[in-house]
Amino acid sequence: MARPREFDERAVLEAAQGAFRTHGYAGTSLQQLMGATGLGKGSLYAAFGDKRGLYLRVLGDYAQRSVASVEQALEGPRAIDALREHLLGLARSSNTGPSCLLASSTAELAAVDADVGQCVKRAFREIEASYVGAVTRAQDEGDIDADADPKALGGLLLAVSRGLEALGHAGVPETSLVQAVEAALAGLPRPPGR
Amino acid sequence: MARPREFDERAVLEAAQGAFRTHGYAGTSLQQLMGATGLGKGSLYAAFGDKRGLYLRVLGDYAQRSVASVEQALEGPRAIDALREHLLGLARSSNTGPSCLLASSTAELAAVDADVGQCVKRAFREIEASYVGAVTRAQDEGDIDADADPKALGGLLLAVSRGLEALGHAGVPETSLVQAVEAALAGLPRPPGR
DNA sequence: GGTATTGTGGACCGCATGGTCAATAACGAT
DNA sequence: ATCGTTATTGACCATGCGGTCCACAATACC
């Protein structure tokens, strides 16, 4: 009952996400958020509490989608191929667009805001679990040595992926990142006797 | 001639560095900078122009030292051992202390401030060159397959190192990072027939 | 149609921000 | 001792900040 909202919450969160990704948390003013979302100050505060509340919502959304996106990308029939495509995709795309919110919130806030820290830590754990799962499948499929520790390899893949994001955003050329990905894949232990 | 400075510029830059590393660029106020450095507003502005000027000086210093630190760490007699120690050191230390200024400035400013972008890009290029050099030496010393592409492996090591920094700062446990480092080292191509 | 309820817009607030400036202090040179 | 030069201090400024609040609008319910 009563007056319904005039805005689509999803769209507002995405607009705010764009602003935060481009300027960081402290660097994004309420005016910018109002401009990006099209909402007035009152609506923004009524809906999300305050700037930090909005950020937390945006970050939560972003983390969830990031995790889901990795999970989905690694689903392909042949895990090793899915991994390759996924990492090459990261290498090719991390140059473009605003920075990953997981990366920027880690650098800017994780150490200083417990909620942010918890959110990104959890996201990374889940993404790592995806990588571990992919490695395990690749072992089952005979593409990675079954004696290798999937946890260690998953952790390595996570580190590489975060490195790609950082370097891409810093302007390291795409070809360089692609080569690094190829080297990482080449370093995955092959099954013996094949 | 004239009145000499009362402060040690090096000390001031390091104090400012601490503040910027902890709170980011936009998140650090002039009051905090004054408090950290012990300088008055006027002195700060007379010496460095403005907040951004101070940040650029701090970042430049930090980048230079970071590059030098990696170069020095990789100097050991046996390149492969130096690499291992260096990466393990990163894995163990990236949990502690405020974030790496290269990481935070990349996330917060590289895309939006050309000078910052240039500085971090250059730093990463130089660090990568150090890794490439270490790989080449390890090849000469018979610890890495001479047929491997040192550029690709150096790029991979750079990506791993940046990933370690990000994940450590996000609170990923040290043991996880150490395992990832071991996996990365284990994946470096061994020379044939040994 | 009236009313209760919720959403919206923007005026408004106190304050901290980044930045300027002029008065003053501390030196080197002569 | 004087003077020119530079460093330091902190008062001062305009502005934009995050946040609050209230009058008004739009709906659901009866």
Image (cartoon, coloured by chain):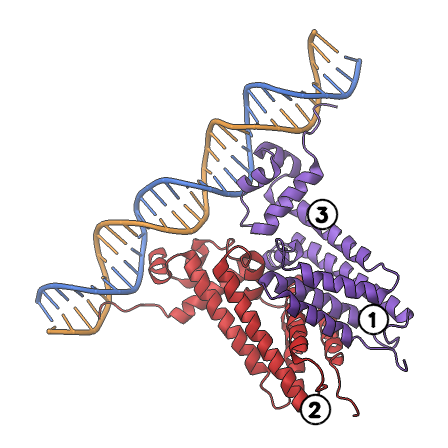
Chain colours: A purple, B red, C orange, D blue
Between discs 3 and 1, the one toward the N terminus? 3
**Residue B142 shows which numbered tag?**
2
Gap in angstroms between the C-alphas marked 1 and 2: 28 Å
Q: Is residue B28 left or right of residue A81?
A: left
The residue indicated by pointer 1 is: A150
Gap in angstroms between the C-alphas marked 3 and 2: 49 Å
Q: Kindly check if marks 1 and 2 are in contact, taking CB atoms under 8 A apart as contact.
A: no
The residue indicated by pointer 3 is: A61
**Displayed quadrant of residue B151:** bottom right
Q: Residue at 57% of width from left, 70% of height from top?
A: B124
C27 vs A129: above or below: below
- The three-letter code of the residue at mark 3 reads Asp
What element does badge 3 sit on? Answer: helix
Query: Looking at the picture, how far across and down is residue B103, in whole percent?
Result: 58, 64
- The three-letter code of the residue at mark 1 reads Pro
Q: Kindly check if marks 3 and 1 are in contact, taking CB atoms under 8 A apart as contact.
A: no
Q: Residue at 90% of width from left, 72% of height from top?
A: A142
**Displayed quadrant of residue A5:** top right
